[in-house]
Amino acid sequence: MGRRLVAVLGVLACGLAACSVDSGQPEPPPRERAVPVDRDEPAILATLRGLDPCALLDPAATGAPTAFPATVAPVRTGPRHCEIRGGPEVAAGVTVGTAFGTEARVTEFAQEPIAGAKAYLPRAVQPGDPCVLHVPVSFGYSVSFSVFIDAALGVDQCTVVRGLAGAAIPKLAEPAGITAAPPLPLAAWDVCALLRDAIATGAPAAAGQQVRVTEDDGVDRCYADPPDGPGYGFSLRLRYDVLLRGGTAKTIGGKTVDVFEFDDCEVSWTDGPVATGSTAPTEQVVAVGAPDCDTAEAVAAAVLAKMGGDPKAEVRPWQRSLTYRPDEPDMPAAG
């Protein structure tokens, strides 16, 4: 057997066996997978604050006329929240700017493409709980849809919420088309920035505490932990409701407020009436919570002083689709 034939056979054998040949050169390091980068969060939040949440709720999209008749009208319950009610045990709602992070996406929800966009449905819904569907808009936030229907009606909640989200997703892809004009009352305020600034002024010992959006109320409510560990923290919430009266009436910054002392303390007031789509009189309610009433009143005074001016639109809104494609990364994980 000639040397050339031996060499050829050796190469063929090495190829079939997937063996490697030592070239004498060091092997290159494995290529690192790129870590996805989050969207511009301030721009996303600025866009969410400008949306009309009721534009995202279409009763006809529920596909359940027995639960949600076509005559049901959406009602705003906050600057970034809207709901429709088909009866005492039937409700659907949308919350713009819900806190929805990686842990929840991985452990509690499962991905499901809806209307060409990435969405998340709960892995399990406990009896008596609503079915909540999240449409992610950044690594930490979503537009969430919830449906609760009494089991006696025999209507699947999650099927209904899919229909609602499916009708809304094309609108979220063109957010300029559902921007409220003029802005909804209280909607222009960045609640977390308001609370952060008010704590720094009214409770400087707690300045620097992380301020975050709550899961239930979206960007209409922010919360900060107490500075000394467990206990009651600070909160600021904006909503459309009837102001709960009956607390201790006081005047802060020229505004009549109600002070309610529980284990913690809440100071609340109204910025006047608001049209919500409901036949019941509704007000713009602002509520400040703090560990004790002296602190709550000081923080409330700082909020009132800040809200005496105009919100500053310092951030350019997000200009593209708010939704993610099903194959588009929406979490800070390499892959």
Image: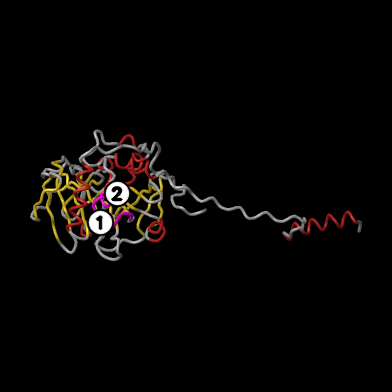
> In this figure, which residue is indicated by the disc labeled 1?
234
Q: Is residue 22 left or right of residue 305?
A: right
- Is 137 situated left or right of 153 in this image? right
Name the foreground residue: 65 vs 199.
199
Considering the whole magenta stretch, tell me its main secondary structure.
helix
* Residue 192: image tag: 2
Residue shown at the point (10%, 51%) measured from the top left: 250
Q: Is residue 256 visible?
A: yes
Q: Position of residue 335 (x, y in %)?
A: 52, 53
Residue 184: x and y, percent? 23, 39
**Residue 236 magenta-drawn?**
no
Query: Which of the image's four quarters has the N terminus?
Result: bottom right
- Other-residue count near label 1 (Cα within 10 Å), few / some / many at <14 / 14–19 / ≥20: many
Q: What residue range appears in magenta?
A: 195-208
Query: Mark 2 belongs to which amino acid?
Result: Cys
Q: Examine the rendering and report whether any part of residue 94 can be seen.
A: no
